[in-house]
């Protein structure tokens, strides 16, 4: 397990580097197309400033988007004790607890490091899960915190946003400047094509990052609780629920334990095509792996 965690962290650094290279490469091609090096320096500079600002404010931004509210022990003693006990078991600082008033069952963790981490659950999750299932979900989110997934997941969300923002700005600048003689020629066409493709490249890297992390957190949670069936049962209930989480969006969807934007057909599983572009691995496959752990325990 520790070897797998270390390997995934190295892959995460590689993916973050790829994001930065996409941003730099995009700005560089446009600087050549417009024959203006300022585009490169301004674009990369703004991307770095935005990333640093969003990174340090990411927790507050995600909680605000989700309309999450903090709770104390007296508000929900059962949830509070579960979080406290699992934090002690995992050897981590107890994260702050937030609740989203939404009937769709789901949960996520956020924060730059274990000391600043938060765990957020919906009222819908609390309503449908048993204590053992709730422990499985909290253990999953605690594993994200312990594995430092929350830091990298936050960075990926931010960098995908940066790529989309820069691509949009550069395309708009091209349209405004289309009648001028900038001399870019074929290079300008290449630049526009890259600006269109860049968000899709960012999405693919986000998918590669997020799916591996979910499998690892599931396994870590099963080891933490010593009861894989608890998390498996929780995933079954969350997947079966067809309500969409109101406060979720594409930027934050990879933070949740199950994709809150998944499309279901008559309460059934997501289609193959929509699942191909999901930030999460198939829930059925996650449940299958957990049940195999149960069988071999």
Image: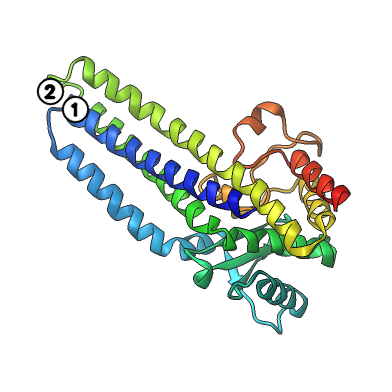
Say which quarter of the image contains residue 208.
Answer: top right
Classify residue 201 as left or right of residue 32.
right
Q: Is residue 51 above or below residue 92?
A: above
Which of 172/137 is in front?
137
Classify residue 25 as left or right of residue 136.
left
Q: Do callouts 2 and 1 mark residues in contact (Cβ within 8 Å)?
A: yes
Q: Residue at the spot x=85%, y=64% of the render?
A: 130
Residue at mark 2: 182
Which of 83/251 is in front?
83
Residue at mark 1: 177
Which of 150/190 is in front?
150
Q: Secondary structure at mark 2?
A: loop
Give residue 251's mark: none
Q: CA distance from mark 2 to mark 1?
A: 8 Å
Q: Which residue extends farthest right?
A: 295
Please provide percent x and percent y for residue 114.
53, 68
Q: Residue at the spot x=70%, y=71% of the render?
A: 86
Classify residue 254 as left or right of residue 176.
right
């Amino acid at each position: 397990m520790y070897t797998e965690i270390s390997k995934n962290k190295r892959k995460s650094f590689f993916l973050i580097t790829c994001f930065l290279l996409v941003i730099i490469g995009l700005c560089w091609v446009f600087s050549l197309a417009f024959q203006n090096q300022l585009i490169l320096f301004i674009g990369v500079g703004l991307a770095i400033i935005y990333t640093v600002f969003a990174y340090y404010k990411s927790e507050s931004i995600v909680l605000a988007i989700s309309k999450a509210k903090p709770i104390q022990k007296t508000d929900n003693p059962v949830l509070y004790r579960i979080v406290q006990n699992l934090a002690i078991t995992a050897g981590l600082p107890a994260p702050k607890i937030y609740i989203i008033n939404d009937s769709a069952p789901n949960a996520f963790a956020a924060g730059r490091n274990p000391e600043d981490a938060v765990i957020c659950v919906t009222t819908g999750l609390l309503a449908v899960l048993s204590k053992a299932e709730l422990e499985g979900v909290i253990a999953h989110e605690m594993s994200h915190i312990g594995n430092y997934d929350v830091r990298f997941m936050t960075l990926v969300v931010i960098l995908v946003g940066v790529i989309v923002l820069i691509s949009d700005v550069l395309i708009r600048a091209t349209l405004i400047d289309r009648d001028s003689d900038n001399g870019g020629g074929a290079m300008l066409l290449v630049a526009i094509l890259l600006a269109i493709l860049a968000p899709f490249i960012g999405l693919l890297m986000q998918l590669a990052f997020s799916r591996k992390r979910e499998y690892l957190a599931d396994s870590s949670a099963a080891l933490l609780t010593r009861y894989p069936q608890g998390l498996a049962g929780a995933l079954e209930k969350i997947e079966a629920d067809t309500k969409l989480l109101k406060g979720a969006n594409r930027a934050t969807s990879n933070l949740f334990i199950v994709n809150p934007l998944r499309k279901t057909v008559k309460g059934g599983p997501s289609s193959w095509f929509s699942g191909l572009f999901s930030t999460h691995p198939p829930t059925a496959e996650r449940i299958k792996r957990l049940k195999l752990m149960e069988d071999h325990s």
